[in-house]
Image (cartoon, rainbow, N blue to C red):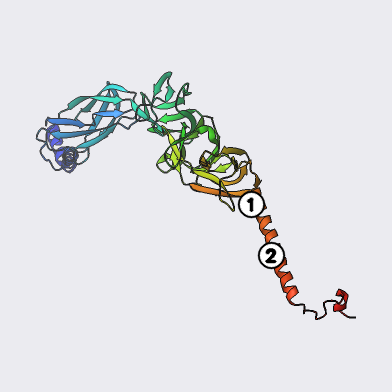
Amino acid sequence: MNAKCGVGLLMKEGGFLRSAILGVFLFGFSLQARAAPGYAGFQANTPTHVSISHQREFVVGEPIRVLARLTTDKGQPLSGQEMALYLDGNYLGQQETDSAGMAALTVPTALPAGKYAIKVVYSGPYAPDTIERELVVVAAEILVETVPPLPGIPFLFEGQTIFSGEDGIARILVNQIGMYQIELLPFEESGSEIHIAFQRWEPESYERVKSFTVPGVEALQVGLEVSYPAKFTFIDAAGETVDPARIATLIARGSNGLQFALESGEVHWLRANTLLRRLSGLNSVTVVYSIQSVSVDGSNVVNQGQQRFSLPADEITLELLLFSATFSAADSLFRFPIGSGVNLAYPDQTTVYYPFDQSGTATTERLARGVYTATIADLPGFSIPIPLVVTRDQVVTLPVISYLDLFAVLLAGILLILIFLRLRRSTWRAAIPEDPDPTRQPDQFFPS
């Protein structure tokens, strides 16, 4: 009776049982389809293979991503599977594979420089697999560029002094992320042929100590003002050296708009560059100088702005407008040499005496271009000061009125007067008629 009842109950509830069995079957099929869509027939013990790819080295502060791939032993990708990432045995997280069996796994924390073991684990539902590789994180290199490029510039970083290389770049290594400071140290200039002055940092900062963060900064620029001694030599048009002691002042104007008056005998330190900020960062532009004037004996002996130079330069050669003049003095009438020499008044109002040689000439070399006044010395007569514009080599003959000239002119004048009077008297006598009565008194010639 009980058996029959049981069978009857089972038959009576047959519809429910069939529905339950069908539901379980479909649920299992959906799990299999999720595990390996498109690959029907995979079993729980289907062999799998995990592979990973990542760049050989990562830099401190750089995001670390590991690409893992899950396939069957036949190379077919498995999607929808969870891949777990471990770093030095510590679980970091997991990611589901995509349709290509790929999972991008990210190390969520910034790692200091060093070597690490990473492991990717697949735990099922298919046959589990694991792969382990070495991960290398290298120190971040920060480039500190000097503008303009200068070797041997000292910096202090993390208690150590570093120097810029021949390319003008100092390289510092940062082993972990964070905020850092670098300081530009004072320059050793004793006996140096270069003066260096700090101007600014880029990114913008005007203190010698510069703060920066890693990650965030890969390069820094430090702008420097560089000065060099300007060593001048002077030559004339013939290429002969001119004594620098003759130079009173030299005025030069730079392309940066600054003008300098340089006194003779001083060491002249001039800026060689100026800094400009452009989109690419700091740029050092060479300052070009033009000579505005060179004063010799009170006169400018260069053409303004014609001669230019830039630094550094071993030597700056300037050509000066210096000329020679040969003087002589001759009697205005008789043309014989006269006087002992010439007094030459310079543009600066000083007067120099140049004696005549045996040929009756005096030659002056290297007169500054300008206006002079020449007079004859020890003159037995009169000489008018003659203005002389010196712009080229020239020969000058100064006319002189001597006492002999005066006497000759006076004598000639007297003779002319006597001749005039003689002629006048002859003409007057010829105009008076002869008197037929020679006995008549003179007053009777003109009766009232």
The residue sitting at 49% across, 34% down in the picture is 270
Q: How many numbered tags mark residues here?
A: 2
Query: At 63% from the left edge and 48% from the top edge, which residue is drawn?
Result: 385
Percent of width and height locating residue 246: 54, 35
Q: Residue 4: percent from the left, percent from the top?
A: 12, 35
In the displayed orientation, state which residue is furthest to the right.
Answer: 448
Q: Residues within 10 Å of mark 1 (few under 14, many from 20)?
A: some
Residue at 17% of width from left, 43% of height from top?
15
Three-letter amino acid code at the position of disc 2: Ile
Q: In the rendering, at what x and y percent does residue 309 appear?
A: 44, 40
Residue located beneath label 2 in the image: 419
User: Which residue is more in the foreground, 265 or 55?
Assistant: 265
Q: Earlier in the sequence, mark 2 or mark 1?
A: 1
Position of residue 316 in the picture relative to residue 13 (left or right) = right
Q: Quadrant of residue 154?
A: top left
Residue 348 seen: yes
Q: Amino acid at mark 1?
A: Asp
